[in-house]
Image (cartoon, rainbow, N blue to C red):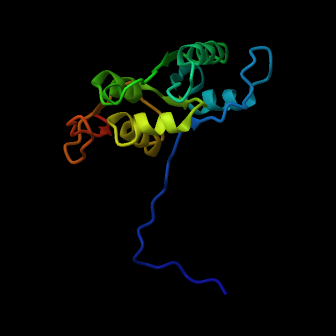
Amino acid sequence: MESNPVASLEVRRVCQGPVMPIGGAEDKDPTSNQVILQRFIDLAGGKKARVLVIPTASETPEKIGQQYTEVFDKLGAKSVEVLAIATREGANSDATSDLIASASGIFITDGDQARLVSLMTGTLAMECIRERNAEGGRGRGDQRRCLDPGRSHDAGRDRACRQQR
């Protein structure tokens, strides 16, 4: 027997993505089909996609960042930037939050997930990624800022990512 929905519960539509954590087994060979990565570009806006690659978990972030830059360029992204976060201070910087805020798709690469967690958990960067994911990740070309004084992050930051009105 199926129960009726509870009338007091608020109904909300969740609009998520495109934030894509990837396990590394996806096909990034430039001569192949690359179905998963093409789908990511499509979700991020196709020819208007502004992709941010975060290779923080990788042991070779520069190499992996360059590799994904080449792949996403080939797949038609408007722009591709790499954000290699190496310190918690870097994860709390204004420059980091600005890059995250301006991306229409955030691509988190494979690697040592413990490194990713230790550098990102509780930071402004992680909160901005979560906020972008919750809002659907699709930027409208406007700059966004992380300014909500109701949230706090380490390094004394009292901001969270939201669209500037």
Q: Position of residue 127 (x, y in %)?
A: 37, 41
Left or right: residue 122 compared with residue 117: left
Compared with 6, 25 (above or below) is above
Q: Residue at x 32, y 38 (%)?
A: 161
Depth order, front residue of 25/146: 25
Q: Quadrant of the N terminus?
A: bottom right
Q: Quadrant of residue 102?
A: top left
Q: Position of residue 17 (x, y in %)?
A: 53, 40
**In the image: residue 119, left or right of residue 57:** left
Q: Residue at position x 39%, y 23% from top?
A: 99
Name the residue located 38 percent from the left edge and 29 percent from the top edge.
101
Residue farthest right in this picture: 32
Evaluate whether residue 19 shows in this view: no
- Res. 156 image quadrant: top left
Residue 15 placed where, x, y %?
50, 48
How far across and how far down the image is residue 59, in percent?
A: 56, 23
Using the image as rendered, state which of residue 19 and residue 23 is in the foreground: 23
